Image (cartoon, rainbow, N blue to C red):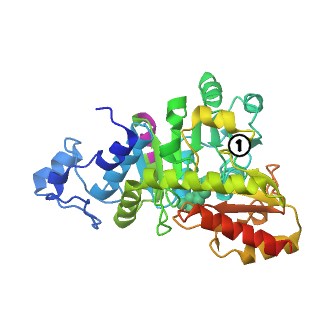
Amino acid sequence: MHRKIRTNIEHYGEDYQRFLGAIAPPIFEASNFAFSSYEEVEEYQKGEMDKFVYTRGGNPTINLLEEKIAMLEKGEAGKAFSSGMGAISSSILSLVKSGDHIICLRGVYGPTYDFIYNYLKRFNISSTFVDGRNVEDIRSAIQSNTKLIYLESPNSFLFEVFDLKAIAKIARENNIYTIIDNTWATPYFQNPIEFGIDIVVHSASKYLGGHSDVVAGVAVTSRELIKGINKNIHLLGGVIGPFEAWLILRGLRSLPARMELHQSNAIKVAEFLNKHPRVIKVNYPGLETNPYYQLAVSQMRGFSGLMSFEIDGGEKELRRFINSLKLFTIAVSWGGYESLVFPGKYAFKDRADGVSLSSQLIRISVGLEDADDLIADLDNALKIAFN
Ligand SMILES: *Cc1c(COP(=O)(O)O)cnc(C)c1O
């Protein structure tokens, strides 16, 4: 049945009778599952029976999360991981082997860059980092051994947006796989599989969980490609725990409501910053004046709450501004109910992909507080900083 996304988030995959009528799914905090007889073991070993055996391979609570996230991303199958990096590394390793080459957008999440650029070198897997805002950069970087194009759109420091349809087309014409990190937009605002991207990965520690209380990751793809991912998680072991899976399921219930509020708060905050005389530049694709706005609205249904901006001052003003904020807590990560702030300059240190962030860049995660209060807090901190 075709239903709208909000209805589906709440109802898809739920079978209350299966769990004694429990409305909230039980947490199957079990490492292994019993066979009822020797004959059942035989049947299972012959592949004639599908059952839960060991939680590294499958668990009812985890499976419900995987079904739901696959539905939300419009993919055929999903896999949950102990972290976003677990999802990213296992998905990449499911597609490449020694001698292969990866094209990656510069500006991707730090540990992803480190994994592709440094770690995979050890296994003779090479990489080229490209700007990618002009898709021809990607086409020109293709080599005979290119196996994968890795994307993040919007990326999470400069919020550059990339043409997913065009990039997927180039990849398919050249028999190259594509993976996208869709953490910023969430499946509520963007479904890259619809544009021909092969694998979608998320840090579920951000908006999917939404409450800053769990680290987890997910990957969504086709029935064919999930086989390689399942094989990898089986061997590398980055499985999510049943309780963590349950926390993500709990977070998903309110994903649409939270994302709508993150969006309306973030647009108000971005507009305030954009007009402020001490703010030089606001990086937020939800602003109509942003250079990526047109492309963004052509492939996204909305905008989340993470953005960055540069202030018109030096180290002294930056320090005073950040220390004067009362409602924006100084912390890494993002996507929770609470507003956060972090200086951008530490994010891309020592990177060879040609991206450097301005020392005046400040990243904020706009939470679910009242927008007027958040704006008053920013306004006050800017006044103190430049006093
Ligand atoms: C946080 C983050 C990750 C990594 O996720 P973890 O759950 O921390 O492992 C990957 N991509 C982006 C864009 C992130 O912000």
Residue identified by numbered label 1:
105
Q: Is residue 182 above or below residue 204?
A: above
Name the foreground residue: 374 vs 35: 374
Q: State the predominant SS element of the stretch in magenta.
A: helix
Quadrant of the snapshot with the C terminus? bottom right
Tell me how many marks there are. 1
Secondary structure at badge 1 equals: strand
Query: Quadrant of the image for the N terminus?
Result: top left
Which residue lies at the image location 25% right of the left edge and 49% below the top edge? 14
* Residue 327 image point, x, y percent: 62, 73
Left or right, 266 with respect to 314, comes to: left
Residue 351 screen position, x and y as percent: 79, 56
Q: Which residues are magenta?
A: 224-229
**As rendered, which of 242 and 239 lies closer to the eye?**
242
Which residue lies at the image location 52% right of the left edge and 48% below the top edge? 186
Q: Nearer the viewer, residue 311 or 239?
A: 311
Q: Say left or right for 70 vs 274.
A: left
Q: Amino acid at mark 1?
A: Leu
Left or right: 356 in relation to 337:
right
Instruction: State which image quarter holds ligand 1.
Output: bottom right
Q: Is residue 172 above or below residue 378?
A: above
Q: Is residue 218 magenta?
A: no
Which residue ends up furthest to the top in the rendered image?
Answer: 173
Please identify the quarter of the rendering in which residue 322 is found: bottom right
Does residue 7 appear in this view?
Answer: yes
